[in-house]
Image (spheres, rainbow, N blue to C red):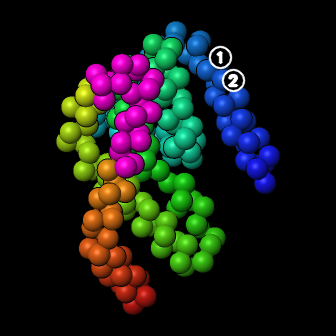
Amino acid sequence: MLGKAAFYFGFIFFSLDVVSVTLKPLAQNPVFVEVLSRSTTPFMGALVGMVIIAIVQSSSITTGLSILLVQQNILPATAAIPIVIGANIGTTALVASIKMQKTARRVAVANLCFNMFGVLLFLPFLGWFAAKVVESAGDPGMAVAWAQLIFNAVMTLAVLLLLRIFQRHLERFDASEERA
């Protein structure tokens, strides 16, 4: 079991290295550069992150790609952070739960609601947040990773504090779904 986990963990890093080599020519592609340049506003960056996650179905890959783009000076860290935060919305859980039991679909919807709430909560402060994390981290690639960690830590704390309210809304959603 431990060997399997180590293999998959290593495979992720190997894949990111392969992607890193592949991304270098994209820096010369005007369409790619144009799309990335539009992600410099927090809203557009979050939107780009949502689109990327819908395509690749992995926030880890989206975060890894964003860090690689920052390290290769293709994307500024202040633009990568909104992409990574927007990628938290994701559709992976929804897609995975399609053919599962009702409880699994409910958990997937709860996960989507939780992540949408987080992104909407951060969105008004995303530009300021990105600038502060980049300033504090020193290394732009590390700033992207720290921003992802901080976002998830803050959202976990928020959900723990607001769990009763969140539970009531999910129960109402569940009751309305059973009536339909």
Q: Which of the 4 image quarters holds residue 111?
A: bottom left
Taking depth in this image into account, of 6 and 116 the one nearest to the observer is 6
Q: Residue at x 73, y 36 (%)?
A: 11
Q: Which residues are magenta?
A: 133-153
Amino acid type, residue under disc 1 in the picture: Val
Q: Is residue 87 left or right of residue 79?
A: right
Image position, residue 177 (x, y; %): 41, 82
Amino acid type, residue under disc 2 in the picture: Val
- The residue that mark 2 highlights is 18
Taking depth in this image into account, of 52 and 69 the one nearest to the observer is 69
Near mark 2 (Cα within 10 A), the count class, few <14, some 14-19 or many ≥20, is few
Near mark 1 (Cα within 10 A), the count class, few <14, some 14-19 or many ≥20, is few
Q: Residue at x 65, y 17 (%)?
A: 21
SS under mark 1: helix
Residue 50 in sight from this viewpoint? no
Disc number at residue 21?
A: 1
Q: Which of the 4 image quarters holds residue 135?
A: top left
Residue 119 in sight from this viewpoint? yes
Q: Is residue 23 above or below residue 158?
A: above
Asked if the stretch drawn in magenta spans residue 143, the answer is yes
